[in-house]
Image (tube, coloured by chain):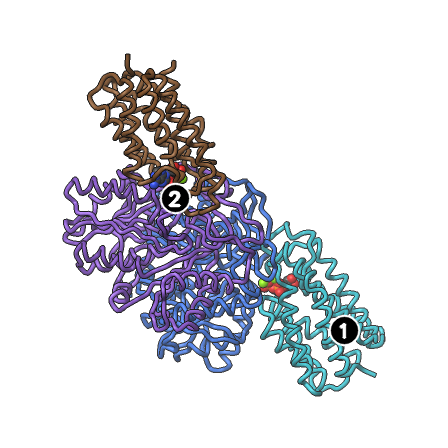
Chain colours: A blue, B purple, C cyan, D brown
Amino acid sequence: MKKLINDPQHVVNEAIAGVAAAHADILSVSYDPNYIVRNDAPVSGKVALVSGGGSGHEPLHGGFVGFGMLDAAVPGPVFTSPTPDPILAATKAVDGGAGVLHIVKNYTGDVLNFETAAELAEADGISVRSVVINDDVAVKDSLYTAGRRGVAGTVLVEKIAGAAAQRGDDLEAVASIAEKVNAQMRSMGVALSPCIVPHAGEPSFELADDEIEIGIGIHGEPGRERIKLEPADSIVDRVLGHIVEDIPFASGDRVLLLVNGMGGTPLVELYIAFRRAAESLAEQGIEVTRTLVGNYVTSLEMQGFSITLLKLDDELTELWDAPVHTSALRWGR
Amino acid sequence: MKKLINDPQHVVNEAIAGVAAAHADILSVSYDPNYIVRNDAPVSGKVALVSGGGSGHEPLHGGFVGFGMLDAAVPGPVFTSPTPDPILAATKAVDGGAGVLHIVKNYTGDVLNFETAAELAEADGISVRSVVINDDVAVKDSLYTAGRRGVAGTVLVEKIAGAAAQRGDDLEAVASIAEKVNAQMRSMGVALSPCIVPHAGEPSFELADDEIEIGIGIHGEPGRERIKLEPADSIVDRVLGHIVEDIPFASGDRVLLLVNGMGGTPLVELYIAFRRAAESLAEQGIEVTRTLVGNYVTSLEMQGFSITLLKLDDELTELWDAPVHTSALRWGR
Amino acid sequence: MGLTSEWARAWVIESVRVIAENRMELTALDRPIGDGDHGENMNRGFTAVMPKLDDLSDGTPADVFKLVAMTLISTVGGAAGPLYGTAYLKAAGAVAGRDELDGEAIVALYTAARDGIVLRGKAEVGEKTMIDAWTPAVDAATEAHAAGKTELAILLAAAEAAENGAVATEPLIARKGRASYLGERAIGHRDPGAQSSALLLRAAADVADG
Amino acid sequence: MGLTSEWARAWVIESVRVIAENRMELTALDRPIGDGDHGENMNRGFTAVMPKLDDLSDGTPADVFKLVAMTLISTVGGAAGPLYGTAYLKAAGAVAGRDELDGEAIVALYTAARDGIVLRGKAEVGEKTMIDAWTPAVDAATEAHAAGKTELAILLAAAEAAENGAVATEPLIARKGRASYLGERAIGHRDPGAQSSALLLRAAADVADG
Ligand SMILES: Nc1ncnc2c1ncn2[C@@H]1O[C@H](COP(=O)(O)OP(=O)(O)O)[C@@H](O)[C@H]1O
Ligand SMILES: Nc1ncnc2c1ncn2[C@@H]1O[C@H](COP(=O)(O)OP(=O)(O)O)[C@@H](O)[C@H]1O
Ligand SMILES: [Mg+2]
Ligand SMILES: [Mg+2]
Ligand SMILES: [Mg+2]
Ligand SMILES: [Mg+2]
């Protein structure tokens, strides 16, 4: 394991100190409890958005703090949900009187810790709504599982709900936009190589030289199947097939296509995958009207990628296009 | 070698097809000869900027095509300079009558191929000026070498010269801004792991499990020294030391600090390095007034990073801050 | 003669020790069917309890459990933090105001802890979670108490049942937590949370024994 | 009796073959002191020459060399593309209009090729580049011609000198191209461009021989 770190125990604190130093124009960082907050928070009268979860998925969530997106991000230890204290502190720091939306990826730990924080915030008189993101079609959603996981689609929810809050929607409206985005999107990931959690010092799983994992989770959780390495186009076709069959995307639909890197895959390869995904959707009559390619929801140095498809309508498109000014997503200002 | 590709021979063509599909709002792509061009090219009366070089450094250069930056990018095969034909074709495609600036990284192949293209363009009546980027302090600049290599600072030249062209500076002025940026910046890189060129199929160099290469080039060229893995802070101190001693940065100077990822290093680690670099510069009385962190000039999936320091004045700061709209760098619109 | 706050403290101190001692093993159990951090998480939490316990000069058993609850909630994170936190919080509530815990109180303590975990995590027996250690422990304690056993015997019965329960998670398919994503591939692996629960319940008996 | 355009064609065809045959070796030479693509680059270029040569129904030797020049320039890239491209272009210029090349013409051809490389790349002998193959070859050809040798003997003398020159790059420190970044670490490695030059010059003699 070769990592550009000092002490594994200090990874998160040192990284957020770097975030603070690099993006002082956008955000500031609180330590103990740790959270990252928009410089102008609390924005009076605006619904505030708070997200968070284990670290190691950067730029998620801290890279999306700023105008038109998150008001605060709460980074837990690497791959471990934060405790309620920093979530509560961040919630209090950003509440501008119009309530706070918690955007939570569907993992038992994240759900429970955010739930406790929300209860404590409500007890302090802050209105909190929560939306649980579960876009990963690799995992069967059934009564017999903890449900689908929240993965790369989270960035789409944060952007679009953030734009709704920024234009002045109330808490109910922002929450229902977030729910709608979550309902209309599906994702699936693939790993070519594993990642290594700093304090663990060994890979989260093993893959042979000619194997890949289809349906990988963003913490290296196993996926649907392990197969032999294939050409990029076949891998994309597989993944896209699972996505399109899960939510009945139909010919004539307009979609946002996100090809997300897991952290260790070069951009040149992501574009090769994007090319095939766009081509295949065109063949199916599905129109790609908005796009995003790059490392947005990562898994440390894992090599691999995920595809997310979000069905768009005029409102979602308008909210996607609305100005955003964060360190990792920026346009319109 | 596990890569998300189809045929190694098709990597560049398929990747630029992906770029075309993902960023149709900004650019379009020509094939055979291959180049990427701003949608509104040629912009009449504006000096045009053309850059290029081997592929495998994405988002350089195609990710910087658009308003306020490059007019065209010419991608060669992976790690191999393009031939004069596509450079000439791109130069012709973007010339708006005010001449064309070629931004060339200092490698013999790049310099010679751009030189030939420039001669051919001049013969066709297009004014061409060239600036050769050589910011890498890892290589001694002397009569006895091919000179310093062009590395991550290239993105700063492309942004700042692009802004000068966008505000209407003439060819001489744009060229001299580019020369000035090149003269006032220094870079140095570190590799934790090698990269693999698709058609080669084996690593460009070998590093033991506890070794890193200080002063690595962006094609995996060897650097100054190979040392045992150290904590991130010591590595940053070494690299920054070489940079600061090469160009006499002095207390009171204002600088832009770029911490650039080589492709396979997670963002969380880049921020740890950024933190230390910012801290160390503050200790030396050097004020970091602009920042950039992320994967901008990469080396396929290589793990590692580079630091670039550019001395700023009011004009360079203003040009840095000017609006830019490309797929990899965007603000102000 | 019931168990005092001395016992409660000793239990916590022993818990800190056994969690530290078994940290790598718990993380190793979490690797194939989870995300490889359960030992790290638990150890972070119990390590943080120690200095706070030193500060708590005296108090009832409920005070000790409440302190553990608040510390775990604010330091463990993940799934285990809120689950164990709620367990200790509800346990504290069940014995509030008492200086000594008799057999009945011990049954109430364990029952409340288990119910707290169910309240938060909604798991049923057989879903391959810590509940598969706790519910057999509660049942065994209830039975031992009904049979008129001593406090020590009740704790020992619960500890043994929890250990058996943890082992019994091995053939199960998981339906809660991360392991549920694996379907049949979870079979053959012991649940890390059930294992840490068994360690904690054994510690309770060990310090009463001494 | 001088060398005709048949010889020029045969030389090019043999060049395509030896470059393809030695592609991996050239790339392997380029790995330790360059970027590991010289064989790939040269092979891409010469492979592209073949169909164009078929299209060139007849013409002088100069026409053949000019075709090679233009093809290499537009397909090889890297440092080798412009350097070899200029070499063939200047060589074509030196024998323009001639149908047959005598000893003097061959010396002029090689001299112009070498000078073209120097013009583009500014390398001197001893800087560990392809010039270290070409300059000895030019000198040997000049000497053989002065001694009244046949065309074939001139080509053979040049080929041998080029091969020795390529070997002689091994102990050198590089001062041009990528290898110059390595300082003393370039010592002990043969320059890939000098090696490909020796292969091409040997091909010239081989086809005249036959
Ligand atoms: N819904 C639930 N109810 C009861 N226990 C659960 C539930 N979900 C998870 N667990 C327990 O939590 C343990 C995992 O804890 P830990 O590894 O610390 O958290 P995380 O899964 O967030 O990494 C599992 O082994 C299981 O015993
Ligand atoms: N300035 C120069 N003059 C003469 N030959 C040179 C010069 N620079 C490089 N070369 C030759 O080019 C060869 C490398 O070619 P190649 O690997 O195809 O290009 P690149 O270095 O761009 O990858 C070197 O081995 C050397 O012989
Ligand atoms: Mg965890
Ligand atoms: Mg090359
Ligand atoms: Mg876990
Ligand atoms: Mg080379």
According to the picture, the residue beneath numbered tag 2 turns out to be D175
Quarter of the image holding residue B179? bottom left
**Against C20, is D148 above or below?**
above
- Pinpoint residue D56: horizontal percent, then vertical percent: 25, 21
Numbered badge on residue C204: 1
* Residue type highlighted by circle 2: Arg
Quarter of the image holding residue A69? bottom left
Question: Which quadrant does the C terminus of chain D fall into?
Answer: top left
Quarter of the image holding residue B241? bottom left
Q: Is mark 2 within 8 Å of ligand 2?
A: no
Number of marks in picture: 2
- Chain letter of the residue carrying label 1: C
- Pinpoint residue D49: horizontal percent, then vertical percent: 32, 26
Q: CA distance from mark 1 to mark 2?
A: 75 Å
Question: Which quadrant does the N terminus of chain D fall into?
Answer: top left
Q: Nearer the viewer, residue D127 or A107?
A: D127
Q: Nearer the viewer, residue C97 or C52?
A: C52
Answer yes or no: do the residues labelled 1 and 2 have beta carbons within 8 Å? no
| In front: label 1 or label 2 | 2
Instruction: Give the residue displayed 75% in from the left and 68% down from the top.
Output: C137
* Residue type highlighted by circle 1: Ala
**Against A43, is D97 above or below?**
above
**Against A315, is B279 above or below?**
below
Taking the image in four quarters, ligand 3 sits in the one at bottom right
